[in-house]
Amino acid sequence: MGGSSIDDDDWELTVSTNEARTVVLVGRTGNGKSATGNSILGRKAFKSRASSSGITSTCELQRTVLRDGQIVNVIDTPGLFDFAVGSDFVGKEIVKCIDLAKEGIHAILVVFSVRTRFSQEEQAALRNLQTLFGNKIVDYMIAVFTGGDELEDNDETLDDYLGRECPEPLKEILVLCKNRYVLFDNKTKDERKQSEQVQQLLSLVNKVIAQNGGKPYMDELFTELKKGAMKLHNQQIEVESLKGYSKSEIKELKEQMHRTYDEQLKRITEMVETKLKEATTRLEQQLAEEQAARLKAEENAFLAQMRSDDEIRKLRENLEMAKEELRKRGENRCAIL
């Protein structure tokens, strides 16, 4: 039940079937990122909360080869959408994720759960992603809703669910994603259903790639890390071919090269952490202003209601007084008669 119709064959022709696709799973802890990754891979490669007490604590890449020979790289991330997680941790994990996906990201799978309400922290984290990577990042986003089994038990479709449980911020995200969304049942044992939901997701991934000119998402961070990794790789080959050096000297040269690369990673991480902290501060200020405005509006509405209630009370009192006056006049008229 994907939200984006896939009835155009033209775009599929522009996507190379040989190039490996790299998809990144992001979302709040407990939404089912790891279980979704396992469904895509067709095996239990990532630790899932449902099957293990251990949950994802660091970015991890797993790979699968589909029946048609297509290679899919799946990167699982820890709870980057959790407010309890600090900017320093998030910064390190984002850089690690970029390092794992140096060739670029073909799609970002934003995982939501139909079992939990869309939260303010999910909205904030998506804004932070846009701050870090620019608005272009939304062109690569696909929303994946887990908990398909629960909707099936209730005889509901994903569109039914979104019709009754879709707050305004989530609607805005789906609009940004151009309604690219898909429902996953990570508990099903039905092989046909497993295959269909993965194929539907990969069709959306192919569509994203085609709509972005066949190019994965990359920015200066990806480019810088890729150059650094290539330089390290070429230097290592060069060192291996050196003649007249002892093993200890070659070891020292290799260690020096790794230290240089690690320093580059550290510098980029610090830059990402700074951007995240600035974005978080701005967001907290914005949320505080929004809350203050909401409280003010509620206060004004309450005062207006109080005034209205007071006016109604006075009208009732005046009406009662008028009735009493009429009654007394009536009694006086009877007494005169």
Image: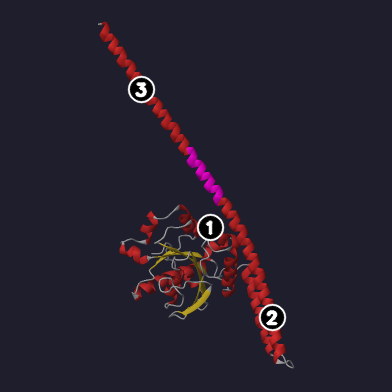
The amino acid type, in three-letter code, at marker 3 is: Leu
Residue 98 at what x, y percent from top left? 58, 71
Nearer the N terminus, badge 1 or badge 2? 1
Label 2 belongs to which residue? 257
* 3D distance between C-alphas at marks 1 and 2: 38 Å
Return the residue nearer the eye: 198 or 306.
306
The structure residue drawn at horizontal position 46% and vertical position 71%, both measured from the top left corner, is 34
Label 1 belongs to which residue? 124
Please report the bounds of the magenta region as a residue range. 287-300
Crowd around label 3: few <14 · some 14–19 · many ≥20 (10 Å): few
Whether residue 252 sits left or right of residue 53 in the image: it is right
Label 3 belongs to which residue? 319
Whether residue 52 sits left or right of residue 324 in the image: it is right
Return the residue nearer the eye: 193 or 93.
93
Residue 323 forms part of the magenta stretch: no
* 3D distance between C-alphas at marks 3 and 1: 54 Å
Q: Quadrant of residue 151?
A: bottom left
The amino acid type, in three-letter code, at marker 2 is: Met
The structure residue drawn at horizontal position 63% and vertical position 75%, both measured from the top left corner, is 226
Return the residue nearer the eye: 309 or 101.
309
Q: Is residue 183 visible?
A: yes
Residue 207 at what x, y percent from top left? 48, 68
Q: Residue furthest bottom?
A: 244
